[in-house]
Image (spheres, grey):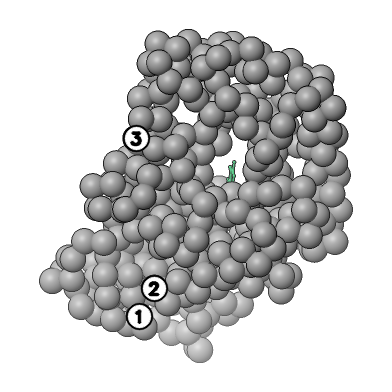
Amino acid sequence: MIDRLSDAGSRHLLSTPALVCDLDLLGENVRSMAKRTAHAGIALRPHVKSHKSAYVARLQLEAGAAGLSFVKLSEAETLVTRLSRDGYPSRISALLTSPLVGPVLAKRAADLSQLCDLTLVVDNLDGVDELANAARAASLELSVLCDVDVGVARTGVAGPSEALRVVERIAASSHLLFTGVQGYGGHLQHIAGREARRGATVTSMELLRHTVEALESHGHVVALRTGGGTGTSEIDIELGLLNELQCGSYVFMDREYREALGDDAEGRFSQSLFIETTVISDNQEGHVTIDAGLKSMATDAGNPLVVGHEGNVTYRFFGDEHGLVTRGPHDPFRRGDRLRLVPPHCDPTVDKYDLIWLVRGDVVVGVADVDARGCSQ
Ligand SMILES: Cc1ncc(COP(=O)(O)O)c(C=O)c1O
């Protein structure tokens, strides 16, 4: 965390739109997931894609996370370097959850593995060969998981026989170490209603279970079974197939998750992330204009909520830099008023900001860099 508090002592003095996080709620969320997974004897490797911040990653590691998950190489390169520059005392265990393509990225992965304990995923024979060649050229061994498609159809092998081909190719390389499987059910996370989400998760995890059994019956040790997200966390714990969870959004939450999870056990995390905005014009009868539009938040998940006015007023995108908020007799809103929004989708919203202001109530107590902002390569 960098001390830039001279810029603002009260959240009302922040230039808006600003990304603001309630530090106490963030801490509670971090501890709650850490406690729950530890109690179940399951490792937690939080996904950095939600916050892209060394400050939050460190909170998670200090609360007992086994390591960190990353999607992209540049995300991992940036955060591993930042954590070590800031004096994080241990070597980071890093998992890259998306497969790499080509010799250039394979070499970068080999280079990164000198700085941290790196595990990679593969779902393709050429991908295995590219990593094996890079590891041989660097005279090192890379740890590799087989990525299994559990129903998303995004990455991953289709089932046991393809998994077997990939794992046998890994095992044939003296520079690769097969350590397990990844089965991430992205399509499950936002299914509304516990029973529907549980049913779909059971089906997906059966696919993974069959693949694990097939690999084990051919003599491969599947030590790590990693996957899961915030929306399926309790169900994954109950099913017990995954021995490591990659949850990400639980640190901040967002409107989309709030609506899908409601009062379910997975929804017990608090909304800690907000967009602080200002009313810049109140000349219209039925609405005001605020300074947060398309450039202030991800738009894939619909509209944000206006904190304290949920159910009474609505927000609608009003161009790149502006938002429209309806108003009525109970919610008059005036020029200069501050309105706080719950972002529709946290991960891509965070990627729009350089800083997250950390607050306790109305007091700004710190600021965290979004170190890996834009690191999508
Ligand atoms: C591979 C992978 N693992 C874990 C997560 C974290 O999921 P969530 O943010 O829903 O907790 C994601 C999110 O997209 C992901 O892509």
Q: Is residue 155 above or below residue 295?
A: above
Q: Are marks 1 and 2 in contact (CB under 8 Å)?
A: yes
Q: Viewer-proximal residue, 171 or 34?
A: 171
Report the Cα–Cα distance between label 1 and label 2.
6 Å
Where disc 2 sits, the SS reads helix
Q: Which residue is mark 3?
A: 115
- Amino acid at the residue labelled 2: Leu
Q: Which residue is mark 1?
A: 360
Report the Cα–Cα distance between label 2 and label 3.
30 Å
Q: Which residue is mark 2?
A: 23
Foreground label between 3 and 1:
3
**Quadrant of the image occupied by residue 313:** bottom right
* Residue 172, x across and y down, in percent: 64, 12
Report the Cα–Cα distance between label 3 and label 1.
35 Å
* Residue 177, x across and y down, in percent: 58, 25
Crowd around label 2: few <14 · some 14–19 · many ≥20 (10 Å): some
Q: Viewer-proximal residue, 60 or 301?
A: 60
Tell me which label, 2 or 3, sits earlier in the chain: 2
- Amino acid at the residue labelled 1: Arg
* Residue 77, x across and y down, in percent: 35, 36
